[in-house]
Amino acid sequence: MAFFDDFGKKVGNAVDVTAAKTKEVAFLTKLNMQISSEKRKMERLYTEIGKLTYERENGKPDSFVSEQCLEIDKIKKIIEELDKKLKEV
């Protein structure tokens, strides 16, 4: 009988440990999801700031972002040319 009592206690302990670990993993997953969500919000805001800065600073040769604005303009032209080729096909 002692064997079954000991075995039952071990199984009960294993179940308790498994339940605790499951709760811990769920909590950590929830925290990671919240962190990821906040990072996505931050990236959207960075993008918005970048677009606003581009719109405000584009065409100003003495701007602190003039090189980046020129690069964006070049990329826009490339996209337009590729879009034209795509429409031709």
Image (spheres, grey):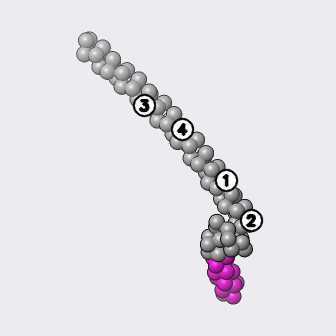
Mark 2 or 4, closer to the camera: 2
Q: Earlier in the sequence, mark 1 or mark 3?
A: 3
Q: At label 1, which amino acid type do we have? A: Leu
- Residue 56: mark in rendering: 2
- Residue 31: mark in rendering: 4
Horizontally, residue 22 falls left or right of residue 55, namely: left
In terms of depth relative to the viewer, which is nearer, 22 or 35? 35
Q: Earlier in the sequence, mark 1 or mark 4?
A: 4
Q: Residue at x 64, y 66 (%)?
A: 64
Mark 1 or 4, closer to the camera: 1
The answer to the question of whether label 4 and label 3 lie on touching residues, with beta carbons closer than 8 A, is no
Measure the alpha-carbon separation of dots 3 and 2: 52 Å
**Image location (x, y in percent) of residue 56:** 74, 65
Q: At label 2, which amino acid type do we have? A: Arg
Horizontally, residue 78 falls left or right of residue 6, namely: right
Q: Main secondary structure of the magenta part?
A: helix
Residues packed near mark 2 inside 10 Å, few (<14), some (14 to 19) or many (20 plus): few
Measure the alpha-carbon separation of dots 1 and 4: 21 Å
Residue 20: quadrant of the picture: top left
Q: Earlier in the sequence, mark 1 or mark 2?
A: 1
Q: At label 4, which amino acid type do we have? A: Leu
**Which quarter of the rendered picture does the N terminus lie within?**
top left
**Image location (x, y in percent) of residue 19:** 44, 27
Pointer 3: what residue?
Answer: 21
